[in-house]
Image (tube, rainbow, N blue to C red):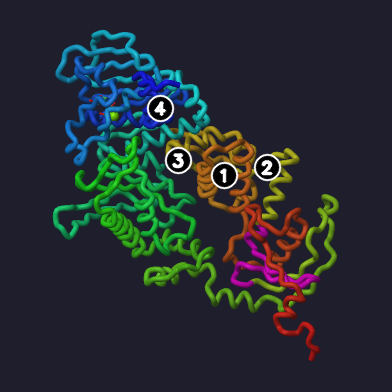
Amino acid sequence: MAIQILPDTIVAQIAAGEVVERPASVVKELVENSLDAGATHIRIEIGEDGRKLIRVSDNGSGLHSSEVELAFARHATSKLRSVDDLSEIRTLGFRGEALASIASVSRVNVTTRHVDEQLGTMLLLEGGVLQQRRAVGAPAGTVLAVENLFFNTPARLKFLKTAATEKRQIVQVVTRYALAYPDVRFVLEQDGREIFRSNGSGNLADVLVTALGLDEFKHMLPVEDEVTLASGDVTIGVRGFTSAPSLNRADRNRITLFVNGRWIQDTSLTYAVVQAYHTLLMTGRYPVAVLMISVPPSEVDVNVHPTKAEVRFRDADAVFSAVQRAVRRAVIAQAQTPTLRAAQYVSRGLSQDAGWESGLGGRQLGMGLQLSEPGDYARRGDALPEAVRDDTEIPEGPEGPLRPRTLPMLRVVGQIGASYIVTEGPAGMYLIDQHAAHERILYEQFMEEYARQEAIAQHTLDAQTIQFPAAEARLVEENLDVLRNFGFLLEPFGPNTFVIRSVPAMLADSDPVEVVSGIVDDLMLGKEPGQEAIEDRIVLRVCKQAAVKAGQILSHEEMQSLIRQLERCRSPHTCPHGRPTMIHLSSEHLAREFGRLGAVSH
Ligand code: ADP
Ligand code: MG
């Protein structure tokens, strides 16, 4: 092929790939423009998942009638004049690329009136090509509608995720900006239905309650700190909220960071937040945080990536320690007031992780010990019979014969560390992880009930409400039927709130709010869940929750009943997550370890 200069429309489409990957990126760019235009009220309407329609209306400055077309040209921006300006960006936009890119892959209808003008302008573009223009009466501000996104780039359409995922991403984007700009009123509507709103009160806590739900917000601690560097002229501010260790998640995605009002992704700063919880959270658990970091604009380079979600700091280490210090202070301040809540999380943490060091941990250790106090344990241990005669006859229940045995008959010897059951079988000693084993048992029972298409036994609750962050509430809504099949009856109850009517019977003793939020957490983790995966994840979570915990002292009868059931599991050797349920030390191995093998016995 001969070399050719690409026509502008194609160049714009290529650039569009960088800036507008998906409906949520269009929402992001348009909202940024509204914020840059000084809007105090931004309404975002989407049709379906945004592919059909994204309309952003603002009460910002509006565009001059002489500049409306220009705004859609590539590299047209009012936010940058010279290279020098690049080092002091105070606006969210500066590349002048978004409108051109968006217009090149959709049909755009914009109505705008500049505050200083009498008449507004209406423009219609298709694939970036001007179709219509006329003067119209309009309120000051801008209404920009993007229709049929990616109609002319079928390849990009193919890369979009399910409608549900795209919708969730949009909710996330809007929520983030609402958090970063609490004094701006945001309203998000989908197909005419309001799904998110912030009140523009200027109070971050107000937005956070809406974004996280009251249940989560109750665990959030205020962060407010400022560090002035030795040079004296650079001050780094960190404010926002971070979770008490009682609220934690399986992934880092709930750590939300903003630098000078811009949402950023930064693994290093995310790590700074996690680090601040050192020894306070189990490994693999992460806090929830929303932090506003402020630095002088000259200290940060925002011109790193087309989506502007990455930044580079002049003094990255200083920002890292400022964030870490601010969060650590907030968490420690809370931890120093022992409350009932603190005692709860400590005891829960203890049961699974003994990694409590440092002065702080030591003090809390005392608080958390109720569960497995040495005295208590010894007393109960003394009461246990030294060895109990094995009841080799297993009575057949009224429901007929039991399932075939998959393990030899095991005799329960005792419990160690309130976590492991020591048993003896024909081939030596079996050390069984009580939690993993119980998870396995419950999992097989649950799956059997489900396979027989029996309604899962339910436990009805007195009206218990649960509130979710908007994105999660959507996910719950989409999965109400699946959840019902597993015994969770949830009913929508006001914005992002549900009433939990019932849970599976095996969870009768668990905190329903904790169980349901655990499930939703797991569902959020799966990026592209197929039906089967969703169901699996629900079952896994239910079993995990219902199973006896490590750190729980079991009576001899309880241990025996657990072992009897494990002996008849299809796959008794692993828990449903694939971890081992038992360690086997053969008689031979024991003999060898004690130097008895081959030796003449005494
Ligand atoms: P950038 O935001 O990087 O400058 P855009 O392509 O997003 O580039 O926008 C181009 C220009 O159009 C902006 O610089 C701004 O002057 C104008 N503009 C875009 N959206 C709005 C809006 N909602 N209100 C007022 N002006 C706007
Ligand atoms: Mg812009």
Between marks 3 and 1 in the image, the one whose residue lies nearer the viewer: 3
Asked if the beta carbon under badge 4 is closer than 8 A to the nearest atom of ligand 1, the reply is: no
User: What separation in Å lies between label 3 and label 1 (alpha carbons)?
Assistant: 19 Å
Q: Position of residue 521 (x, y in %)?
A: 51, 45
Task: Report the Cα–Cα distance between label 2 and label 1.
Answer: 15 Å
Q: Which residue does the numbered mark 1 point to in the structure image? A: 461
Residue identifier under label 2: 456
Residue at x 36%, y 59% (from the top left corner): 276
Disc 1 C-beta below 8 A from ligand 1: no
Q: Earlier in the sequence, mark 2 or mark 1?
A: 2
x and y percent of residue 350 in the render?
A: 50, 65
In which quadrant will I find the N terminus?
A: top left
> Which one is earlier in the sequence, the residue at label 4 or at label 2?
4
Dot 3: element: loop
Mark 3 lies on residue: 468
Membership of 435 in magenta stretch: yes
Quadrant where ligand 1 appears: top left
Q: Of discs 2 and 1, which sits in the foreground?
A: 2
Type of the residue with mark 4: Glu
Q: Residue at x 68, y 52 (%)?
A: 442
Residue displayed at 60% across by 33% down: 481
Is residue 463 visible to us here? no
The residue sitting at 39% across, 22% down in the picture is 3
The span from disc 4 to disc 1 (Cα, nearest Å) is 29 Å
Q: Quadrant of residue 535?
A: top right
Q: Secondary structure at mark 4?
A: strand
Work out whether 38 lies above or below 338.
Answer: above
The answer to the question of whether label 2 and label 3 lie on touching residues, with beta carbons closer than 8 A, is no
Magenta highlight range:
416-438
Mark 2 vs mark 3, foreground winner is 3
Residue 589 among those drawn in magenta? no
| Amino acid, disc 1 | Leu
